[in-house]
Amino acid sequence: MKSVLFVCLGNICRSPTAKAVFDYKLARAGMVLETDSAGTGDWHIGKPPDPRSQAFALDWGVDMGGQRARQVCREDFHRFDRLFAMDRANLEDLHRLAPPGARARIDLVMSLAPDYGLDEVPDPYYGGEAGFRRVIDMLETAADRLIAQLDTGV
């Protein structure tokens, strides 16, 4: 695996946070993996991540202010090895959008950490502070598991 795309609905909370957390964890592990994030919806294109996501990421030591929202495109299904959806609705959208012959494997990001107890990363957009902290915790666990898989060649 050389490239990963993280996908949520609007690409301003969960998927940019996933990119930031995975990038941070990969760098600390001395691993290189191309990462990006995108949304299945188009209404936030060009906007930075939600200020609350940015604030919690900064508290955790990660700056994601340079990211800008974009929408999933056909090329993503050929460019990336894995597309990780944050929830089942986006997983279904990705399967529906996948062009014939797409090479990317599509799965839920929490499939990396099945013992976490949740298979979907909840959208913190309409929730409070605890939701943003929970998203980071979940994605940190998933990132650690991906790094372990890459380290062992699984």
Image: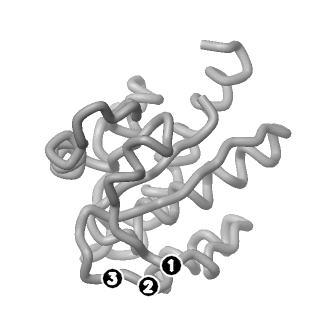
Front residue of 36 and 88: 36
Determine the CA span between mark 2 and mark 3. 6 Å
Q: Does the residue at mark 2 contact the one at mark 1 (Cβ under 8 Å)?
A: yes
Q: Amino acid at mark 3?
A: His
Picture coordinates of residue 18 (x, y %)? 51, 55
> Mark 2, residues whose alpha carbon is within 10 Å: few (<14), some, or many (≥20)?
some
Return the disc, 3 or 1, that comes first in the chain's sequence. Answer: 3
Residue placed farthest to the front in the image? Answer: 101
Write the residue at 58% across / 46% down.
140
Picture coordinates of residue 91 (x, y %)? 23, 43
Determine the CA span between mark 2 and mark 1. 5 Å
Picture coordinates of residue 133 (x, y %)? 48, 63
Which residue is disc 2 drawn over? Answer: 46
Determine the CA span between mark 3 and mark 1. 9 Å
Write the residue at 22% across / 51% down.
90
Picture coordinates of residue 72 (x, y %)? 34, 60
Tag 3, which secondary structure? loop
Tag 1, which secondary structure? loop
Q: Does the residue at mark 2 contact the one at mark 3 (Cβ under 8 Å)?
A: yes
Which residue is disc 1 drawn over? Answer: 68
Give the total number of marks visible in the rendering: 3
Which residue is disc 3 drawn over? Answer: 44
Q: Amino acid at mark 2?
A: Gly
Q: Please tell me whether residue 95 is drawn above or below residue 18 in the rendered image.
A: above
Quarter of the image for residue 115 reads top left
